[in-house]
Amino acid sequence: MTNDSARMRKVLTFTRRSNRMTACQKRDYQHLASRWIIPYQNTVFDYAAVFCSPAAPSAPAGAFPAPQGETDAVAPACAPAPLVVEIGFGMGSATAAIAARNPHLSYLGIEVYRAGIGRLLRKIEAERLHNLRIIEHDALDVLRTMIAPQTLAGLHIFFPDPWPKTRHHKRRLLYRPRTDLLARALAPGGYLYAVTDWAEYARRAQEELARTPSLTWAPQGARPWRPATEFERKAQTQGRAIHELFFIKA
């Protein structure tokens, strides 16, 4: 491990928010966590055992992102769907919408904000989103220990903390060598999709990702399958532009 990597491991990339929940969120968390939350562990987890279904639905025509290199002709009795991870899903509305629209994919949301977790648990249960699970832990720890290299079909990072003060830039998630860890988790052909309303962060993040080995920028603007988040709607109301970063792993 390099000195830079060791230092990165000691720095949090997120602000510790209050874990205060509404009565409804608290009830949902207490009743549903054991069903939909995967406990953090210090070893690689078998996501196939969690998500695998003998009757997984086929990808709808024109769906994006489509599984890389897969066809309907090969259909094992229990083949896990490609796995997409979202880091920091907030209140989870966009996360649930994406999972609902893409039942042919497995989604794992990583969050430490318990009110948002409680709200997403309610959506998962109400909408029976069997292709969506949650891990309540620091996402970088999860990527280091629970996700095997070259596993993920995609990584979603929507509106990460911009850490605007110069002295805090080292806390940014999209900052090397953290981006090396993100790239390591992606399978060849997998994508990293980041969105921010902070122009300076978007510029610096693009530079950091472009310098990350094996990642290639694919500038096409907003993906039509990504629903707006609550934070995004608030930013647009306040007149802030939305910046989209999309990279593919070679």
Image (spheres, helix red, strand yellow):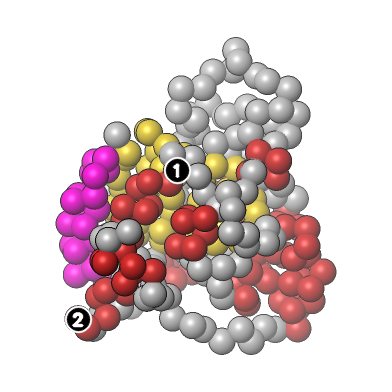
* Residue placed under numbered mark 2 in the picture: 166
Query: Can residue 7 be spotted in the picture?
Result: yes
Task: Check whether the beta carbons of the residues at disc 1 and disc 2 lie within 8 A of each other.
Answer: no
Give the image quarter of residue 22: bottom right
Name the residue rendered at 71%, 76% in the picture.
25
Q: Nearer the viewer, residue 199 or 152?
A: 152
User: Which segment is the magenta one?
Assistant: 197-220
Q: Position of residue 45 (x, y in %)?
A: 62, 48
Work out which quarter of the rendered image holds the N terminus and state it: bottom left
Is residue 70 inside the magenta stretch?
no
The circle on residue 149 is 1
Q: Nearer the viewer, residue 5 or 143?
A: 5
Question: For this view, does 134 lie left or right of residue 84?
Answer: right
Q: Tag 2 or tag 1, which sits nearer the N-term?
A: 1
Residue type indicated by callout 1:
Pro
Query: Would you place residue 187 above or below residue 125 in this image?
Result: above
